[in-house]
Amino acid sequence: MQRFANKTAVVTGAGRGIGQEIAKALAAEGAKVAVVSRSESSCGKAAEEINALYPGSATAYAVDVADHAAVQELAKKIGDELGTVNILVNNAGVTRDGLLMRMKEEDWDTVLDTNLKGAFNTVKGFMRVLMKAEDPRIINIASVIGLIGNAGQANYSASKAGLIGYTKAVARELSGRKVTCNAVAPGFITTDMTDELPEAVRAEVLKKIPLGDFGKTDDISAAVLFLASPAARYITGQVLAVDGGMTM
Ligand SMILES: NC(=O)c1ccc[n+]([C@@H]2O[C@H](COP(=O)([O-])OP(=O)(O)OC[C@H]3O[C@@H](n4cnc5c(N)ncnc54)[C@H](OP(=O)(O)O)[C@@H]3O)[C@@H](O)[C@H]2O)c1
């Protein structure tokens, strides 16, 4: 199926993990994709891997999504180089876990600046081009932790809960221009981010997943591609949990 022929997508945090999988899946279905991540080497490698499968589909852009001015410049550059943008996926995210007693101010700021302000920065940068594009979509990658909270992740929980509120506000503000904005809330997905967790924590989480298994990156890309597709034209301001039943 080529649901995204003639569409252009920007995926942040696409250097690896969930973002790389989303970028790859969009390219597989015909999209031109801007593969955005923090480091040149990571987005460069991801774009190279995608182009090896779908030649000419991916272009790498290194930017820190927390840097407002840099993101505005990036938006202009992508507009000039790729033309229109139909789909913006705000996936870049980080964790700096720790109990509040020990959490440093910089741990709070880094997580909020990347996970929440990053999505403000990109929407500011791309909203004008999205408003003029065909089937315009914004998809924010939140987390089940933004719905239920988690001890040791006050900064991350706040950033993802904030992203969910932001999703609904953006959906309302841009609805007049037919730009939809939805969030996907992954549960526990196997990536570098979750590989860092101790085995005991992983075993505890597994007990709370009714479907009895961790998720895979393509479980998330499948949901994102649905929301990005023309079939989802009448869905906006929603949060789709993809979590094996964790938060039902
Ligand atoms: N894995 C899970 O279980 C899970 C669950 C719920 C939600 N999520 C969310 O899903 C998203 C992706 O998670 P993941 O597990 O795939 O993470 P990951 O493997 O750690 O990859 C994160 C990606 O984000 C990029 N990134 C981080 N900070 C950035 C910044 N300031 N500017 C630009 N790019 C930045 C990284 O760039 P570099 O490659 O250059 O370092 C990397 O490509 C995150 O928003 C995360 O919160 C994940």
Image (cartoon, rainbow, N blue to C red):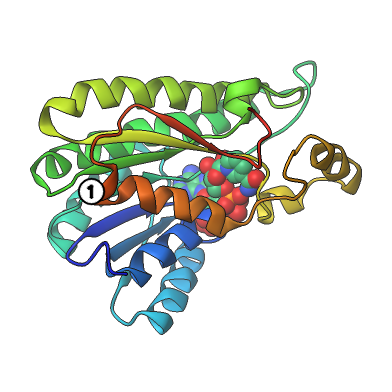
Direction from residue 120 to residue 103 in the image, left or right: right
Q: Is residue 5 above or below residue 110?
A: below
Q: Nearer the viewer, residue 212 or 60?
A: 212
Secondary structure at numbered mark 1: helix
Direction from residue 11 to residue 73 in the image, left or right: left
Q: Which residue appears at 34% of the width and 26% of the height?
A: 237
Residue pointed to by mark 1: 75
Q: Which residue appears at 76% of the width and 25% of the height?
A: 152
Amino acid type indicated by mark 1: Ala
Q: Position of residue 98 (x, y in %)?
A: 76, 28
Question: Which residue is farthest left?
Answer: 132
Q: Nearer the viewer, residue 22 or 107?
A: 22
**Number of on-image labels:** 1
Query: Does residue 156 appear in this view?
Result: no
Question: Which residue is farthest right?
Answer: 200
Res 55 → quadrant: bottom left
Q: Nearer the viewer, residue 125 or 214?
A: 214
Direction from residue 57 to residue 173 in the image, left or right: left
